[in-house]
Image: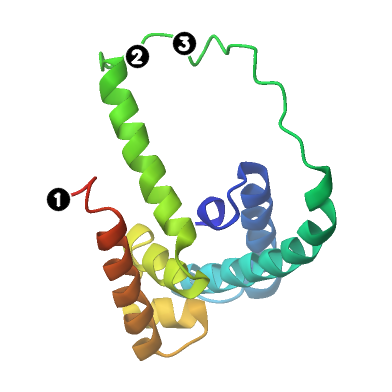
Amino acid sequence: MAHIATGHHDEALELVQDAMFKLVERYRNRPETDWGPLFHRILQSRIQDWYRRSKVRHRWTGWFRHDPDDSTEDPIQTAPDPRGRTQSNILEGEETLQQLESALRQLPLRQQQAFLLRNWEGLAVADTARAMGCSEGSVKTHYSRAIGTLRERLKDYWP
């Protein structure tokens, strides 16, 4: 979820690690059944903080961006697939996943959160509401809108 929200692997790992530390620091005495929703609530808070910080940061750093030199080839990336998949199968699957990730990133943050918590994390509506800090009705609304938008944007990739 953090990777989809940030688009950066390292920053996503930092957010998850920070959320784990805060969970242990503040809620280690709570029952294990509370840890999942609490962790997701902390993580969603960290993601929102990241959005706020990055919005300010990108106002000033946008002028200085440049693309790194990608001319070197990674031998691991060019190794044959151990499962016997062809390059076209891999590319089709990767393109589909890229389209899904792109569509998820384009969703408003609350819809993105509701979709990821419900589908990828498998949380119930009540647990999702606690993790997002909103009502169950809001979760259902955000989730429904996310599903509708994703179906429309991904209709060429999923039947």
Left or right: 66 as drawn, with respect to 110 = right
Q: Is residue 89 left or right of residue 134?
A: left
Q: Which residue is mark 1?
A: 159
Question: Residue at 36% of width from left, 33% of height from top?
Answer: 94
Q: Residues within 10 Å of mark 2 (few under 14, many from 20)?
A: few
The residue under the point 62% across, 65% down is 47
User: Would residue 61 be seen by someone viewing this image from the given angle?
Assistant: yes
The answer to whether the residues at label 1 and label 2 have Cβ atoms under 8 Å apart is no
Nearer to us of marks 2 and 3 is 3
The numbered mark at residue 81 is 2
CA separation, marks 3 and 1?
31 Å
Q: Residues within 10 Å of mark 3 (few under 14, many from 20)?
A: few
Circle 3 residue: 78
Residue under the image location 14 percent in, 50 percent down: 159
Q: Is residue 88 left or right of residue 52?
A: left
Circle 2/circle 3 CB separation < 8 Å: no
Tell me where residue 18 sits by quadrant.
bottom right
Residue at the farthest front position: 63
Asked if residue 51 is positioned above or below residue 74 in the image, the reply reads below
For badge 1, the amino acid type reads Pro
Q: Is residue 124 visible?
A: no
Element under disc 1? loop
Query: Residue sitting at 60 percent across and 54 percent down?
Result: 6
| Image depth: mark 3 or mark 1 in front | 1
Going from N to C along the chain, the mark reached first, 3 or 1, is 3
Secondary element at image label 2: loop
What is the crowding at mark 1: few (fewer than 14 residues within 10 Å), some, or many (at least 20)? few
Q: Which residue occupies the foreground of this view, 126 or 31? A: 126
Q: Earlier in the sequence, mark 1 or mark 2?
A: 2
